[in-house]
Image (tube, helix red, strand yellow):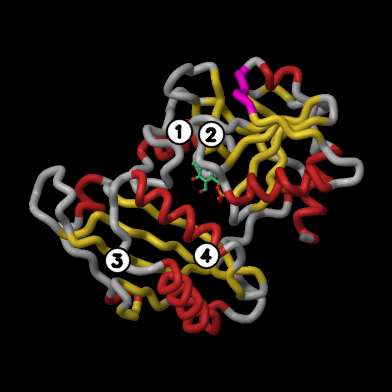
Amino acid sequence: MKTIINARFIDESEAVVSLMDHGLHYGDGVYETLRTYSQKSVMCEEHIQRLFASAKAIHLTIPATAKEIQQQIQQIIACNKQEIGPKNELVIKVIVTRGIGQRGLTSSCTPTLIITADKLPIYPKNIFTKGVAVCTTPYFRVLPAVKSLNCLAQVCAKQEADKKKCFEALLCSSADADIVTEGTITNLFIVKDKAIFTPKNHVLLGITRETVLSLAKRMQPAIKVMECDIRKTEFYGADEVFLTNSLMEIVPVVKVDGVAVGKGSVGKITKELMETFKRS
Ligand SMILES: Cc1ncc(COP(=O)(O)O)c(C=O)c1O
């Protein structure tokens, strides 16, 4: 696969980043992950916009314009799509690190812009047809609105999920461990009495989350949407739970912390949203 480092195309096997890069030392940087549909980028502008918002929040200057990044994404798709074959899709990751600088927590560095491509994993069908189990954890992201290179909270939470044989781990709010915020790489939704509820605070405002919210409002009849905190106890009364992410779209959840959600099978509204999302 070809990658791009600071606007230079290079074979993945030869791509190197400096040992002095602050992304490596301090997890100092931001990123975006997007996928292709029919080998074309989708929601590219939204991802780039969020990349710039994340960078702004940590006072990091991206060494390219949004238009240049968009062009590089198109170029990396064009030069890697043959390698994966016509039936497969690509995952594109755009990473901006603080870059090369003196040792220490300084921001006077020369940022590095990396764009990589990979074959999109094929998710097992049964996660969508049968739903998944998730677990709550005590981990929280420090700057939740920022898609930061520092993913330690998510790494630790995912280890717990793996131990418990759960598909995803849920994070909590830094302000209150009883408030469940999002998954390690997903946004969280609860369905109750035909309305959907999703946290707005202490989360990454996901691009799929936004799409689902607008689809729900436009459905016939429209589904009521509430953006609010969700407490752990609310899973017990929920009819349905689902997760969203750019690569996986909508994933139904049928068990939280070992307890069945609703009837313990994929819910009606989740199914409707999954179908509507596929058509959109
Ligand atoms: C912490 C976190 N929350 C939510 C999401 C979902 O965001 P999106 O729908 O933009 O992929 C992600 C995506 O990786 C994430 O890392």
- Quick one: label 3 or label 4, which is nearer the N terminus? 3
Question: Residue drawn 77% across and 49% down?
Answer: 215
Residue that label 2 marks: 169
Which marked residue is nearer to the observer: mark 3 or mark 4? 3
Question: Where does the C terminus fall, quadrant-wise?
Answer: bottom right
Q: The residue under label 4 is which amino acid type?
A: Val
Q: The residue under label 3 is which amino acid type?
A: Pro
- Quick one: label 2 or label 4, which is nearer the N terminus? 4
Q: Which mark is residue 91?
A: 4
Q: Which mark is residue 63?
A: 3
Q: CA distance from mark 1 to mark 2?
A: 6 Å
| Crowd around label 3: few <14 · some 14–19 · many ≥20 (10 Å) | some
| Crowd around label 2: few <14 · some 14–19 · many ≥20 (10 Å) | many
Circle 4 SS class: strand
Circle 3 SS class: loop
Task: Pick the residue in front: 202 or 59.
Answer: 59
Whether tag 1 and tag 2 are in contact, CB under 8 A, the answer is yes
The image position of residue 149, as x and y in percent, is 35, 48
Q: Which mark is residue 157?
A: 1
